[in-house]
Image: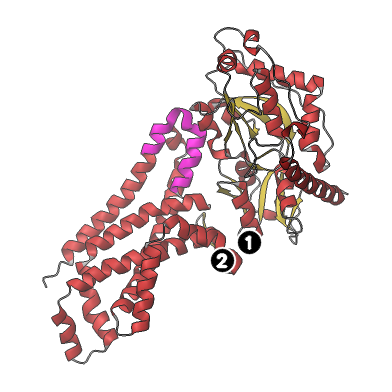
Amino acid sequence: MRHTRIKAAIAVLGLTLSLAACGDAGSDDEGGNDVEVKENAADDFEDGTYMKELAEAGKITVGVKYDQPGLGFKGATADVPSGFDVEIAKLLVADLGIDPEDTDATTWEETVSDNREPFLTEGKVDLVLASYSITDERRQVVGQTGPYFTTGQQLLVPADSDVESIDDLKGQEVCSVTGSTSIDRINEKGAKGVGFDSYSECVQKVLDGTVAAMSTDGSILAGFAAQNEGQLKVVGDEFSEERIGVGYSLEHPEMCEWINGVLEESFEDGSWAKAFEDTLGPSGVETPDPPALDECPAA
Amino acid sequence: MQAVLDNFDAYLKAFGYTFALFLVSGFLSLVLGTLLVAMRVGPIAVLRTAASVYVTVVRNTPLVIVFGFFSFAAPPLGINFKWLDVSIGGYDFTTLFGAAVASLSLYTSAFVCEALRSGINAVPLGQAEAARAIGLPFGGVMRQVVLPLAFRASLPPLASVQIALIKNTSVAAVFGVAEATYDMRSLLNDFGATQKFGIFVCFAIGYIVIVEVFSFISYRLERRWRVAL
């Protein structure tokens, strides 16, 4: 049952990717993912808040992934990355009265797992939406709120592998990316986590048989399985619950309430569900109910 | 600083991997470099050319590219280290370690070869001629007369090459080997906001200690082996 579902998911995701590739040639306005840019947004924010500062400057930098089909992905010729993370980011950016499609106003900075905290603490990016799991350790360093999405860690193995769950991989090397929670989870489960700089390097290692499997959020793995159809498959139950949230700098704690407010609004007016259907929906995953948001820490 | 002290086990283990990389690749590069230099000064033209082509190519290639070759280009061609699966006291030496050792050894051996060649140039011609005069074949001349003298004469540049190797092991961090630089990156990721300076200092100290111990040994050898030619 699961196999057929995954196969269907992969097939549809593959189709979407190819469709999306075709779409690039056409007009961007047809994307259907247009968000309404708020006018005079600066008036809505209190003086002294970072949101007001951003809205008045009319510029924002958002950290997203570039190499995760369906979540955060940027093709070589695309101006703006695509994916669910990016759609959610667009809602936030638009709420500040900034046009997310205008690359002069909105800078989409590539963040990899390893540099998300440094980028936030150093102020290189204002927001991070990069399949960023909320953890207590990270909350010591940066602000995280949400979640706007929950997923779980699974395994990506060669198509002819008989590995069925992480328990089959005790003592073996399983790769993921450096600085991700996935590595810790792999180690906890008794396998040996090996970290690379990017998911694509890790996928390469699975393909050439250097490591037995790759492990991270199922939604990320499905994208890679689709890219390497027939060579790779996603297996196993989700063995963790990842709560994907928005990262911001602890220097601006007021951003938390604002982010939660925008997310809450998107849950209610259906733009969250629409973003999901447009990006991850085609992979066959049913649009889930929006997750419950964490409360902001008292500022 | 506190971050490193709290994770001192991981810190030591990471430098253990660094040290293991250095020991194995250092040894292999010395053996291979010696072979190369023997080929370069030997009487067979084909081997001479082969060795100098190798040295030129490898010495002019950045280490990261050599690493990249053994990590990503070589495995599909069947050059992998899957046969390597050794565990000694909590340390695992597997495929990734093998690829790192191969890259570091092949890269460093080109420099070892050139350092040794400078030593051979320092051996007076008369020594080799005398060795030949008593009837030693080329192998005997090299093994019993020229190379021992050349090793002693080129000890300082050889030590520099090996020190460079110690520091070059850090490149393995990007290719999945959990050595010191890899560990430093993960600590920076977790505690970088508040303890960046301390973490960098601690890891710099680790490298300095290894390099200093090595330099000390090489100084002692230099004094003990001093030759008057």
Q: Chain of mark 1?
A: A
Name the one closer to the observer, A217 or A49: A49
Disc 1 residue type?
Answer: Asp
Q: Is residue B226 above or below residue A282?
A: below
Q: Chain of mark 2?
A: B
Residue at (81, 37) in percent of width and height: A281
Side of B67 where A65 appears, left or right: right
Residue carrying label 2: B80
Callout 2 touching callout 1 (CB < 8 Å): yes
Give, as a single range, the part of the protein colored magenta. B180-201
Residue B220 sits inside the magenta stretch = no
Residue at (19, 68) in percent of width and height: B153
- Residue A148 in view of the camera: yes
Disc 2 residue type?
Answer: Asn
Name the one closer to the observer, A94 or A22: A22
> What SS does tag 1 mark?
loop
Residue at (35, 73) in percent of width and height: B52
Residue B193 sits inside the magenta stretch = yes
- Residue B88 in view of the camera: no
> What SS does tag 2 mark?
loop
